[in-house]
Image: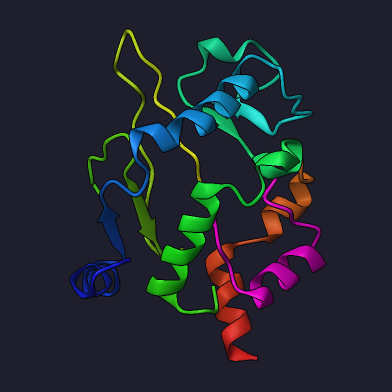
């Protein structure tokens, strides 16, 4: 459950840091799937497996600074609705309602923020470990419908012309006006 103070921080600051959303034992299954993506045991075509910092794709991901798998639930359908996705959906609903930074976080923590909040992370400076992230984005049905009408799927395989015409914040503003 998200506390009232955490909800207020989210609405005031645009983000909130929630600690220990997943316990160490709960991370194990997700980590195994992540490793399968990393080692090519789950096939990800095109640009949907890439180095988030350089955009490089189609090469050995062990050299990537930040390994990024777009729409992992498309490529690993057995993972759809997993514990992390269910908890993330519950948290998003508590913070944003049904119509869906520097902040250091530790293993098992998450951050939740609105689209208008600038967010990202620097490269992993550790020499002996990987940084892993599992990102779940929740958007209103109206936003998803408008994106799909333009051919945008949140995949790096989307046509460049489609990517250039979709601006999430501008799209949100247009939907609210109508």
- Depth order, front residue of 102/41: 41
Residue drawn at 53 percent across, 31 percent down: 29
Residue drawn at 24 percent across, 70 percent down: 3
User: In which quadrant will I find the N terminus?
Assistant: bottom left
Residue 60: percent from left, percent from top: 63, 10
Residue drawn at 53 percent across, 57 percent down: 86
User: In which quadrant will I find the C terminus?
Assistant: bottom right
Q: Is residue 52 visible?
A: no
Residue drawn at 73 percent across, 53 percent down: 153
Residue 28: percent from left, percent from top: 46, 28
Residue 142 forms part of the magenta stretch? yes
Establish if 73 lies above or below 67: below
Q: For this view, does 63 lie left or right of residue 75? A: left
Residue 123: percent from left, percent from top: 36, 25
Establish if 132 lies above or below 26: above
Residue 51 forms part of the magenta stretch? no
- Depth order, front residue of 154/37: 37
Q: For this view, does 148 lie left or right of residue 87? A: right
**Residue range highlighted in magenta:** 136-155
């Amino acid at each position: 459950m998200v506390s009232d103070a955490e909800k207020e921080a989210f609405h005031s600051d645009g983000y909130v840091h929630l600690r220990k959303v997943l316990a160490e034992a709960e991370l194990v299954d997700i980590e195994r799937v992540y490793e399968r993506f990393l080692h090519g045991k789950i096939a990800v075509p095109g640009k949907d497996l890439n180095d988030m910092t350089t955009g490089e794709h189609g090469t050995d991901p062990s050299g990537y600074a930040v390994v990024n798998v777009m729409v992992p639930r498309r490529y690993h359908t057995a993972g759809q609705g997993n514990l992390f996705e269910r908890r993330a959906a519950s948290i998003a609903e508590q913070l944003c309602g049904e119509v869906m930074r520097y902040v250091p976080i530790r293993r098992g923590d998450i951050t939740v923020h609105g689209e208008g909040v600038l967010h990202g992370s620097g490269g992993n400076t550790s020499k002996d470990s990987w940084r892993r992230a599992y990102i779940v984005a929740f958007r209103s049905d109206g936003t998803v419908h408008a994106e799909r009408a333009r051919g945008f799927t949140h995949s790096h395989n989307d046509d460049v012309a489609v990517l250039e015409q979709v601006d999430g914040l501008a799209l949100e503003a247009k939907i609210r006006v109508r």
